[in-house]
Amino acid sequence: MRVIADMHTHTIASTHAYSTVKENAEAAAQQGLSMLAVTDHAPAMPDAPHLWHFMNMGALPETLCGVKLVKGVEANIRPDGSLDLPHRVLTELDWVIASMHGDVFPPSDDPQVQTAAYLEVAKNPYVDLIGHSGTEKFRYDYETVIKAFKEYGKVVEINEGSLRVREGAARNCLEIARLCKKYEVMVCVDSDAHFCNLIGEVSQSLAMLESIDFPEKLVLNYKEERLTNYLQQRKKRLGSMLTLQAKM
């Protein structure tokens, strides 16, 4: 198994990351990737870029170093399940990750707190990918929520950074992956790179999926055509939704 895109990466716009968009694109090209998502943290994170960063992503080229750029965000999930970017901005982006971070969502020892928030996120039409949900401090009712992600067409991330640095995440990610296989939920395998040398580095995640015979047909970023079609359908869906809202 392999991936053709890294759909969760950070740049120096998030100041706890250390590479530019161009450095990340160069690294993606060296790894043989055809697509790269630029997904810095949304404004509720203490060191995130300003709202204008996401409003101005049209300034980025469509391709850089021969790699197609996907302009997105890693939005923060609030305790009520809402996100920290306005709908008008989310609509203009190519790709929206929704993740829980302690600075925005104080984790609870009661998994039902996180479960309730994720069930709200599942209904959000702007959200594409559920980011690093295997984090131990944000435990939730995996089976209930994964079934909701299936119902609402969300993609679940298998996050290399979680396997590498988040204690307890490996067993959680394995359980989540098994449930995604059981309920045929699409996953996306990403680096969550905060430095260019980690772009496209997802070896532990792929090994984990292979260990449970995870179907390649359920890996969104396994084939360029599959990912491109998803992004095109997303754009059409949101466009139709906005047209309908304008008529109401």
Image (cartoon, helix red, strand yellow):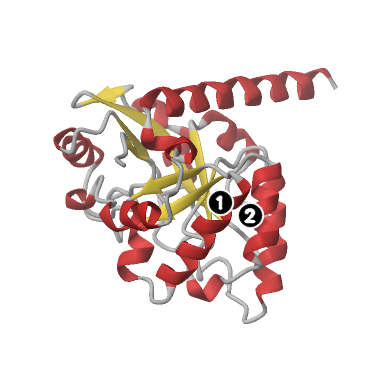
Mark 1: few/some/many CA within 10 Å (<14, 14-19, 20+): many
Residue corresponding to mark 1 = 180
Say what amino acid the circle numbered 2 marks.
Ile
Q: Earlier in the sequence, mark 1 or mark 2?
A: 2
Task: Give the vertical position of 18 relative to 238 (above or below).
Answer: below
Q: CA distance from mark 1 to mark 2?
A: 7 Å
Q: Classify the position of the N terminus by image quarter.
A: top left
Q: Residue 35 falls in which quadrant of the image?
A: top left
Front residue of this view, candidates 120 and 78: 120
Task: Give the vertical position of 133 relative to 198 (above or below).
Answer: below
Say what amino acid the circle numbered 1 marks.
Cys
Residue corresponding to mark 2 = 146
Q: Classify the position of the C terminus by image quarter.
A: top right
Tell me whether the residue at label 1 lies in contact with that at label 2, contact meaning CB atoms closer than 8 angstroms.
Answer: yes
Image coords of residue 186 (percent x, y): 53, 42
Front residue of this view, candidates 199 and 171: 171
Image coords of residue 205 (percent x, y): 34, 55
Residue at 63% x, 68% y is 140
In the image, taking residue 138 as reference, residue 20 lies left or right, namely left
Image coords of residue 209 (percent x, y): 39, 53
Front residue of this view, candidates 141 and 114: 141
Q: How many numbered tags mark residues here?
A: 2
Q: Most extreme residue toward the right, as rendered? A: 248
Secondary structure beneath dot 2 equals helix
Residue at 40% x, 44% y is 39
